[in-house]
Image (cartoon, rainbow, N blue to C red):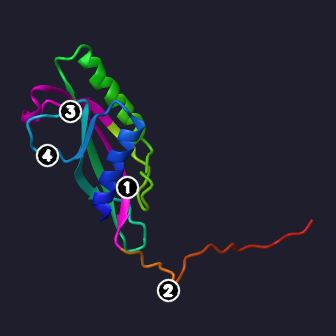
Amino acid sequence: MFWRDLHQKICKTLKEEIPAIQTCEVYRAVRREIIAPAVFVELASLEPGKDPGTEELALRARFEVRVVVDGTVEDSSVVVRSLAAEITRVVNKNTWDVENVSAGEFISAGGDDFRPELDAYLVWMVEWVHELHTGQSMWLETGIIPHTISVGENVRP
């Protein structure tokens, strides 16, 4: 549920924030026609994150969005780059309103010529990462709740 919901929220937010996007899918389905401009959201990799000390699994999740436009349309080179820049704006510092997901950190954007099934289109890829924690925290309401104690002297004037 967590991963599906996160992917769907990313797609939903991109379509809401960038009205020019006609198609937004999570992991492109194989088919013959794409209504462009289109974006495809993918979780590309998981790496270890910073341990939060809660027994949750800390991960750095790297996401990719491929921006796809018809290369035969006038100004398509400008359109694909403009959409990539807009997607960068949306993903940077975005948490998608999902608990335990840090603000997105933009990594890069650039041309992507490595998907043969998209050779008929102009494609740019935007990459970013989120730090996130999965699993259950040991600091639940039924256990010991961490809190701050200030130790020192109170001096009155």
User: What separation in Å lies between label 3 and label 4 (alpha carbons)?
Assistant: 13 Å
Q: Which residue is mark 3?
A: 35
Q: Which mark is residue 29?
A: 4
Q: Which residue is mark 1?
A: 131
Going from N to C along the chain, the mark reached first, 3 or 2, is 3
Going from N to C along the chain, the mark reached first, 4 or 2, is 4
Measuring from the top left, give residue 121's x and y in whole percent. 15, 26
Going from N to C along the chain, the mark reached first, 3 or 1, is 3
Q: Residue at x 28, y 47 (%)?
A: 63
Q: Which residue is mark 2?
A: 142
Contact between marks 3 and 2 (CB within 8 A): the answer is no
Outermost residue, bottom side: 142
Measuring from the top left, give residue 141's x and y in whole percent. 51, 81
* Residue 2 or residue 145, whichever sits in front: 2
Contact between marks 2 and 1 (CB within 8 A): the answer is no
The residue segment tinted magenta is: 108-135
Q: Helix, strand or loop at disc 4?
A: loop
Outermost residue, right side: 157
Give neighbour class at mark 4: few <14, some 14-19, many 20+ (Cα, 10 Å): few
Kind of residue at disc 3: Ile
Q: Which mark is in front, 3 or 2?
A: 3
Kind of residue at disc 2: Thr
Q: Residue at x 43, y 54 (%)?
A: 102
As drawn, 121 above or below 63: above
